[in-house]
Image (cartoon, rainbow, N blue to C red):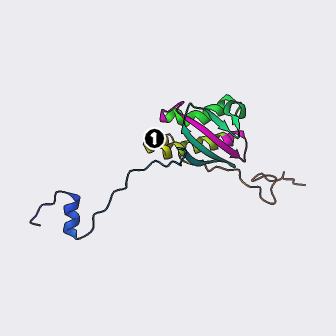
Amino acid sequence: MAEQLNSLQDLAGAAGEAVVETAAPREPVRDELGRSYATGKRKDAVARVWIKPGSGKIVVNGKEMPVYFARPVLQLIVRQPFGVAGVEGQFDVFATVTGGGLSGQAGAVKHGISKALQLYDPSLRGALKAAGFLTRDSRVVERKKYGKAKARRSFQFSKR
């Protein structure tokens, strides 16, 4: 090795191979109306979520969020991604949710908002990923098995 290698390109040239390209920075994904779309899931609930720049209005199934999610805890869950990303009140959200109960639906909307935010502005991905909002919570109710009272509970044992 008489010559000194100073960079990866020199190393690739010396080995006779092509230089491995690094991953290109993520591009924003928006439709013709300037919206980003994502699907969020939690338990049996599935939420389709569209976000666009606006005043912070959140509409779920045609109703304002405080009307649809009446419990303050559920409203807090839905607003969490904006707080973590530091963009409170900057995006309008339109969501349609089906399946599950209110708690699962709130989690699905949260997941959808998080995914749509990172598609709209890829620089927000790090904060959302660190908070765990981009990971789908895959816990679902276990199915009932035959010969059992519930999923795992057996019938009461009788000795006689």
Q: Position of residue 96 (x, y in %)?
A: 67, 44
User: For mark 1, does the 10 Å Cα neighbourhood hold few (<14), some (14 to 19), or many (20 or more) residues?
Assistant: some
Asked whether 45 or 33 is in front, the reply is 33
Q: Looking at the image, which residue is at 46% across and 39% down? A: 127
Tell me where residue 129 appears, x and y as whole percent: 48, 44
Using the rendered image of the protein, determine whether residue 101 is visible from the camera's viewpoint. Answer: yes
Residue bearing the label numbered 1: 124
Q: Position of residue 70 (x, y in %)?
A: 71, 30
Residue 116 drawn in magenta: no
> Looking at the rendering, which quadrant does residue 81 occupy?
top right
Residue shown at 83% from the left, 53% from the top:
155
Q: In which image quadrant can residue 94 be found?
A: top right
> In the structure shown, which secondary structural element does the residue marked by tag 1 occupy?
helix
Q: Foreground residue, 156 or 34? A: 34
Count of all numbered marks drawn on residues in the image:
1
Q: Work out whether residue 2 or residue 56 is closer to the camera in this orientation and state it.
A: 56
Magenta extent: 85-105
Amino acid at pointer 1: Leu
Q: Is residue 160 left or right of residue 74?
A: right
Q: Quadrant of the N terminus?
A: bottom left
Residue 53 located left or right of residue 22: right
> Residue at image x 54%, y 42%?
114
